[in-house]
Image (tube, rainbow, N blue to C red):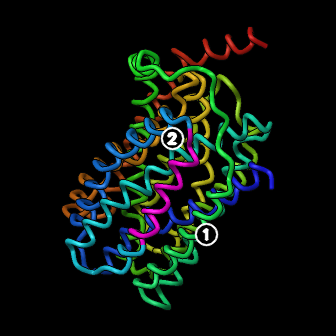
Amino acid sequence: MKASNLLRGFNFLYFALLAMFISFLPVYLDVQGLSPSQIGFIIGTGGFVTLIAQPLWGMISDRTKSIRKVLLVLLFFSTIIGYLLYDSSSYPQLILYAMLLYFFLMSIDPLTESLNFTIAESSGTSYGSIRTYGALGYALAALLTGYVISYFGEHSLALLFGGIGLISFIIGWIMPDAPVTGKPVTLKSLKHFISNKETLMFLLLVFICSVPARMNDTFLGVYIRELGGSTELVGQAFFLAAGSEIIVFALSFWWMRKGKELLIISFSAVFYFLRFFLSAWITDPHILAYLQILQLLTFPVFYSAAIQYLYRIVPTEWRATGQTVLALLFFGVSGILASYVGGAVYDSFGGKTLYLSISAISFVGMLFGLILYRVYGKRLSASDEAAS
């Protein structure tokens, strides 16, 4: 079987696990009786764990020049810990297993994205045609998980998570590794990458845009339930969000333009602003769920452009680590602020104020992206035209 097809299957299964964790951990904790601030504490602390775990595993992958072997180790422990997490009820156990799952499961994401991009380049396949299957897996798992909780109880997630984790491990075992770059890994090249002003400004833009997205990911399910929605509706909301990504990732070869990445990121920030501003005024949980279709013009557009821009400015030998830095900002650093601050705002002022706040942050992200495009974007476009 072709490497790209195996990788598509792996994306489908891994992002299914990610849907059960990112989208439904807050719902699971809510069902266990935890408050928004307690939920924010667990998820925010998980962000600190991610800050350590993702760079660690990214460095190990770059040093060993293997992504697949590291993925297998991470998947093995993630499957076991995920089963234990969704079979637990006590607050101390929930904290422990959630932290361990942040350490192992969340570290898989940047390595998978690095593998996606590298295999796509080597096989002449578009990144989007592979990543589409991740969006499909996330969407279907989100829909399925909502019904599983509703009909079989929240602890049934333990078996579902364990089963999908086992199958993904098998696929990962037979999946080929990414081609290894001929350039040596050096700390000097990493220092140059991180200390570059353009890189720092780009990472700041990613952070600004990520905070609102992560707050929504964390508290959307809780907000829907507060408005009177069921866990089934939560699953449907995340299904619509992730399902809408499929066509965008699949057609990324058509709409993505080199040198226009910063402009595209700003475009996605506009729709982040509209999505969250409208969410603040909605009182019907069904309408809020249907609004998640705007994911079509937010996350897949933002993330595809961010990855392409990153791979244009990062040294080749540090791609896996560079991808880790990107994921670290999106799931780690921004997740900490989103969870702690978001939980406190939600507890003190309610969901409406939370969504008005994150819509304002998205608006700032749009303005900052346009500024960076004026400074760096046109220069990159000119260099691309000269190279061609």
Mainly helix, strand or loop, the magenta region?
Answer: helix
Mark 1 burial class by Cα count in 10 Å: few <14, some 14-19, many 20+: some
Q: Which disc, if any, is residue 167? A: 1
**With respect to residue 222, does 333 lie above or below?**
above
Locate residue 192, reporting x and y percent: 43, 15
Left or right: where 101 falls relative to 258: left
In the picture shown, does residue 145 fall above or below 299?
below
| Residue interval drawn in magenta | 66-82
Circle 2 sits in a helix, a strand or a loop, which is it? Answer: helix
The structure residue drawn at horizontal position 65% and vertical position 22%, both measured from the top left corner, is 259
Say which of 233 and 336 sits in front. 336
**Total numbered labels placed on residues in the image:** 2
Residue 362 lies, in percent from the top left, at 43, 42
- Type of amino acid at the residue the image marks with label 2: Ala
Label 1, label 2: how far apart the Cα atoms are: 36 Å
> Looking at numbered disc 1 in the image, what kind of residue is underneath it?
Ile
Q: Secondary structure at mark 1?
A: helix
| Residue 269 tag number | 2
| On screen, residue 115 above or below 202 | below
Residue 189 in the image, given as x and y percentages of width and height: 46, 17
Disc nearest the viewer among 1 and 2: 1
Compare marks 1 and 2 and give the one earlier in the sequence.
Answer: 1
Look at the image and tell me in which quarter the N terminus lies: bottom right
Q: Is residue 69 magenta?
A: yes
